[in-house]
């Protein structure tokens, strides 16, 4: 795993998912200041499923592609995650496990 994050899933009415997400869910991840999308596998810390609209979900995230993010991430950095064109939630990094990703 690359980092621990706190996620807020949008409700279905807000444009979020229509169904639950299981641990292992792999939406795209996008940081505003990095012009690159990658998949980020989510492994939920205290549960196995998350419903649309849930807030404060703690998850470990494994980035499929790491190179564009080397030395660019820090605790408190915010990101969005989604499916295709649709953003289904936001996140904030709480802890970074992969030392190569930490902003220098």
Image (spheres, rainbow, N blue to C red):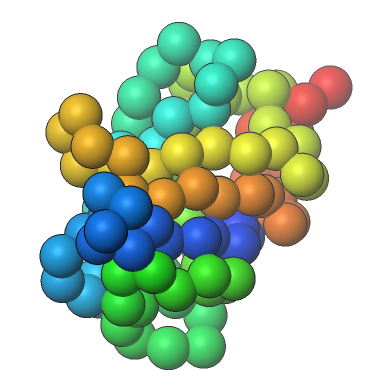
Q: Is residue 5 left or right of residue 10?
A: right
Q: Position of residue 12 (x, y in %)?
A: 24, 61
- Among the 4 quarters of the image, the one containing residue 36: top left
Q: Residue at x 53, y 70 (%)?
A: 55
What number of labels is visible?
0
Residue closest to the eye, 23 or 16:
16
Q: Is residue 67 left or right of residue 5?
A: left
Q: Residue at x 55, y 50 (%)?
A: 91
Q: Residue furthest top?
A: 35
99 in relation to 103, above or below: below
Q: Residue at x 33, y 31 (%)?
A: 38
104 in relation to 35, above or below: below
Q: Residue furthest front?
A: 13
Q: Residue furthest bottom?
A: 47
Q: Position of residue 89 (x, y in %)?
A: 41, 50
22 in relation to 71, above or below: below
Q: Residue furthest right?
A: 104
Residue closest to the eye, 49 or 60:
49
Residue closest to the eye, 74 or 9:
9
Q: Position of residue 27 (x, y in %)?
A: 27, 47
88 in relation to 73, above or below: below
- Visible residue check, residue 39: no
- Position of the C terminus, as image quadrant, is top right
- Visible residue check, residue 101: yes
Q: Is residue 16 left or right of residue 53?
A: left
Q: Residue at x 76, y 37 (%)?
A: 74
Q: Position of residue 95 (x, y in %)?
A: 73, 56
């Amino acid at each position: 795993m690359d980092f621990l994050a706190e996620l807020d899933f949008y409700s279905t009415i807000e444009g979020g998912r229509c169904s639950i997400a299981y641990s292992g869910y792999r939406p795209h991840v996008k940081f505003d200041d990095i012009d690159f999308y990658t998949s980020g596998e989510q492994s939920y810390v205290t549960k196995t499923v998350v419903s649309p609209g849930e807030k404060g979900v703690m998850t470990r995230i494994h980035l499929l592609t790491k190179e564009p993010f080397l030395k660019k991430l820090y605790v408190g950095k915010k990101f969005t995650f989604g499916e295709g064109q649709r953003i289904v939630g936001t996140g904030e990094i709480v802890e970074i496990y992969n030392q190569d990703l930490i902003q220098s």
